[in-house]
Image (cartoon, helix red, strand yellow):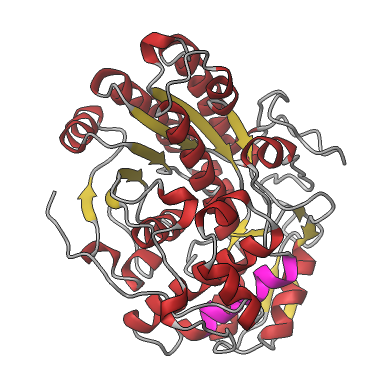
């Protein structure tokens, strides 16, 4: 598969604002960490869904997907640190968002060994600050707190971890995310119960990890490391080839976050006085691949090299910091309660990732934006075919017809963009 191999649907067959039941159209959505890898994919999808997106983050590094897509010109780009609770409060109070997606974090395991204090402070205190601002400033809001699959007390067993399993963490990063989950649960029980007095504020957490996809340029992540080596025609250095993870394309967890936000918004907008379903939804959710889909780092590198020829070398560092070797997630809860399910398998996820990066070597920002939107739309078409509820309910006929005609290729998504509005 080459970088330009994605089939495109005619522009008129895809309505980008119809996803997720149209819930996000016209909504004010506040995204912390919007300049990051997942945050940029989330913001781009929200813009396609017709949302009014407000991003809140510290300055981004270069290269970054955020800069490559020129997102700063198409959303409300607000710069600030989630550790500055007063600045965060002013930002949230001025926007009064309908939904908040909290992604701002220190997200690298190896960096957490170099800066444990900063990791704990950002991931725990930053999360608490978001919840405290919501408690003080908002009466009606859905909040999705994004953590990680590494928040579990990982005993490196074959059994998949469920949302009710104990929190824990060997390394500072994992432990900080476990602590954040405990804080989120405490705030939810103490201040955002599903009783009638606060039924219009709903807090949920989303646990996913090991996402791959175009535009991730972080250090010490296997796919960006592979890409940098291949771009320089150097061998890929692999330090932990047997580590097994639930790899997934970034659109998988992002679709999960959006599905959870949709379901919670629809629930708090009803006149349901019992709050039974709201209590089920305002909780923790795992988003990952189907059972048995976990692969080793060696598998990732080998699959990537099928699409981008090169070589890899083993380089074991006996003094390297500890990293878990095995991790599996149960996604039964997301499947049963949200009707969510994974769409792209491991091979497809890697192929789409490589296609994006190979395009990035020579394409302009406008062309990269089109490629990114095409992948979102192609993923949506495939979600319809595999029965994901958010896609079937949201795109009743247009995408279904297009998927049948094209075999599920990706469209040339509409390019309407909103001008940048100053915060």
Q: Main secondary structure of the magenta part?
A: helix
Is residue 271 visible in the rendered image? The answer is yes
Q: Where is residue 78 drawn, in percent x and y?
A: 21, 49
Quadrant for the N terminus, please: bottom right
Instruction: Decide which of 380, 181 is in the foreground and name it.
Output: 380
Total tally of numbered discs in the picture: 0
* Residue 295 vertical placement versus 358 (above, below): above
From this viewpoint, is residue 311 visible?
Answer: no
Dividing the picture into quadrants, the one containing residue 83 is: top left
The residue furthest front is: 397
| Residue 232 colored in magenta in the image | no
Is residue 350 inside the magenta stretch? yes
Query: Residue 278, position in %: x, y?
Result: 53, 23
Residue 11 falls left or right of residue 110: left
Residue 91 against residue 311 in the figure, above or below: above
- Horizontal and vertical percent position of residue 87: 19, 34
* Left or right, 41 with reference to 314: left
> Residue placed at 65% from the left, 76% from the top?
404
Point 57% across, 47% down: residue: 256
Q: Furthest-right residue in view?
A: 158
Taking 231 as reference, is 202 left or right?
Answer: left
Residue at 37% x, 25% y is 131
The front one of 205 and 201 is 201
In the rendered image, the vertical position of residue 307 relative to residue 149, given as above or below: below
How far across and how far down the image is residue 346, in percent?
A: 73, 65
Q: Which residue lies at the image location 38% right of the left edge and 57% below the top edge? A: 49
Quarter of the image for residue 61 reads bottom left
For the view shown, which residue lies furthest in the left direction? 422
Q: Which residues are magenta?
A: 346-358
| In the image, residue 68 above or below residue 310 | above
């Amino acid at each position: 598969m080459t970088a330009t191999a994605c089939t495109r649907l005619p522009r008129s067959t895809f309505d980008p604002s119809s996803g997720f039941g149209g819930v996000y159209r016209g909504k004010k959505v506040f995204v912390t960490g919007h300049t990051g890898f997942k945050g940029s994919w989330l913001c781009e999808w929200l813009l396609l869904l017709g949302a009014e997106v407000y991003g809140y983050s510290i300055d981004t590094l270069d290269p970054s997907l955020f800069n490559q897509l020129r997102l700063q010109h198409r959303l409300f780009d607000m710069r600030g640190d989630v550790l500055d609770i007063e600045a965060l409060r002013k930002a949230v109070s001025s926007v009064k968002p309908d939904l908040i997606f909290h992604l701002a974090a220190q997200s690298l395991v190896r960096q957490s060994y170099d800066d444990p204090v900063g990791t704990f402070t950002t991931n725990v205190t930053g999360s608490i600050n978001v919840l405290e601002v919501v408690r003080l400033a908002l009466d009606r809001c859905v909040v999705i707190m994004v953590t990680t699959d590494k928040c579990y007390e990982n005993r490196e067993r074959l059994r998949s971890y469920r949302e009710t399993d104990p929190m824990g963490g060997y390394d500072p990063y994992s432990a900080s995310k476990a602590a954040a989950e405990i804080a989120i649960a405490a705030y939810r029980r103490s201040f955002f119960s599903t009783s009638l007095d606060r039924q219009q504020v709903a807090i949920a957490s989303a646990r996913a990890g090991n996402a791959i996809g175009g535009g991730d340029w972080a250090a010490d992540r296997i796919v960006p490391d592979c890409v940098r080596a291949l771009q320089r025609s150097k061998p890929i250095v692999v330090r932990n080839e047997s580590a097994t993870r639930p790899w997934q394309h970034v659109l998988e967890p992002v679709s999960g976050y959006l599905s959870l936000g949709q379901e919670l918004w629809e629930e708090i907008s009803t006149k349901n006085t019992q709050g039974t379903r709201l209590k089920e939804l305002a909780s923790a959710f795992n988003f990952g691949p189907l059972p048995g889909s976990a692969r080793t780092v060696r598998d990732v590198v080998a699959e990537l090299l099928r699409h981008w020829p090169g070589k890899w070398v083993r380089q074991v560092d006996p003094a390297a910091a500890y990293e878990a070797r095995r991790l599996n997630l149960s996604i039964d809860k997301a499947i049963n309660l949200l009707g969510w399910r994974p769409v792209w398998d491991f091979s497809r996820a890697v192929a789409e990732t490589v296609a994006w990066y190979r395009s990035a070597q020579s394409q302009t920002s406008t062309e990269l934006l089109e490629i990114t939107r095409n992948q979102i739309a192609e993923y949506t078409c495939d979600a319809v075919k595999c029965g994901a509820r958010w896609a079937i309910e949201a795109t009743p006929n247009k995408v279904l017809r297009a998927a049948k005609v094209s075999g599920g290729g990706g469209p040339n998504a509409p390019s309407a963009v909103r001008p940048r509005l100053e915060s």
